[in-house]
Amino acid sequence: MQVPTRHPSAVLDRGPDTPGTSGAGSYQSGPSRPQDGKPRKNGTKRPRRPRKDPLWARLVVIFGALLMVFSGGSIVGAKALVGQATGTIAQDNLLGGAGKTSAEGGSNLDGPIDMLLLGVDIRQSWEPNDTRADSIVILHIPSTHDQAYLISIPRDLDAQIPPFSESGFAGGSDKINSAFYHGAQGGAGWSGGAQLMAKTIKSLTGISFDGAAIIDFGGFRGVINELGGVRMCVDQQVTSAHMSMVDGKQMWNADAKKTGKTRTPVVYKKGCQTMNGTQALDYSRQRYGLKNGDYDRQRHQQQMIKAIAKKAMDGGIASNPLKINQLIKSAGKAFTLDTGGVAIDNFIFTLRGVTANDMMLLRTNNGTFNGNSSGKEELNELTLRMFDALKRDQLSQFVIENPEIISTS
């Protein structure tokens, strides 16, 4: 697939948070469902669902909780809002040579669609390119366009990172999350980091991509806050390794220390609760103190994406034009997007039937560390077969045959 010419990146802003409140949560996943309205074996038809989720909310699923910014209504009106939103979202070449070729179906959206989602954390005291991919997720939508799968790549996975002339990287073995860092050096920037990450994953799994997105966690907080927070179910009590409370405000530990004031730990207790942007992102990034470390974190990140999708669809936001406008602005601060040269409105409307309840969370390595003889992390045989099934667009059947890869919470 050909990728678009680079465009200037947008400056990613950040905003304050407001506390969340307690509440009940829900979680649902399972194999692909038959499409509504299709005949049953007995000749009758399945009833259609009485309501359709607003189009802008379905975009949350399509981009793995990225573009939750469009209202419902007519196709013409929705496409106008797509145009408005894409004017605020930075677009860049994030795939390089890892985009799908025409032979792989990259010239159209009729077949399966695969997107690479990269979460990065950059703070004002850090150099913009001194960062690694904190979250690496593949979003797969089969050719039926009625299901969405999220698969997280372990950040500590041992990988052979290919050479990358754009940043001057000669190639070598390293943890896979460092591919973003190596690709971003020498002035190549975040687009270079994403390109080398996509190239590394393609070399490891054989998967090419239709699109990619970089999620700036600092800007993403604003999106969650505009939604009024998201409901998360904490399955293990964990103390934050990144943040502390000072005078009732949640702060990064480095900033909290500078205040010279008394600091108290941030503790996420078991149970379902509504979290604001800072809380949800901080909780979903914890790995120390959790039973399965980074694999529990991967699961919590997937859980957060699905929680955002459900909140966007069920929160009544589509009827509030002011709220929609604020979501558009917040999304523009949080994402850099590459749709592989396909017009964004075509990309979106091809997948407009996917909903939050069609999103399935899958796990690698049975949800636990899988070390080789050298003690380095590698993908187990079942995970390699899962990626092969994804590449052949047979993931739905693979899930049915191997239900243990479904992530539960």
Image (cartoon, rainbow, N blue to C red):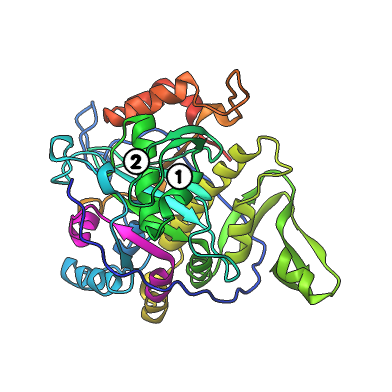
Q: Secondary structure at mark 1?
A: helix
| Label at residue 199 | 2
Q: Secondary structure at mark 2?
A: helix
Q: Give the image quarter of residue 137.
A: top left
In the rendered image, which quarter contains the N terminus?
A: top left
Q: CA distance from mark 2 to mark 1?
A: 9 Å
Residue nearest the viewer, comparing 210 with 126: 126
| Left or right of 161 on screen, residue 25 | right
Q: What residue sits right under mark 1 in the picture?
A: 179
Task: Tell whether position 203 is magenta.
Answer: no
Tell me which residue sits at (31%, 34%) in the image: 207
Q: Give the image quarter of residue 63.
A: bottom left
Pointer 2 local density, CA inside 10 Å: few below 14, some 14–19, many at least 20:
many
| Label at residue 369 | none
Question: Looking at the picture, does residue 37 appear above or below residue 123?
Answer: above
In the rendered image, which quarter contains the C terminus?
A: top right
Where does the magenta region start and end? 328-349
Discs 2, 1 touching: Cβ within 8 Å: yes
Identify residue type, mark 2.
Answer: Lys
Pointer 1 local density, CA inside 10 Å: few below 14, some 14–19, many at least 20:
many
| Left or right of 112 on screen, residue 254 | right
Identify residue type, mark 1.
Answer: Ala
Residue at the farthest bottom position: 322
Tell me which residue sits at (30%, 70%) in the image: 8
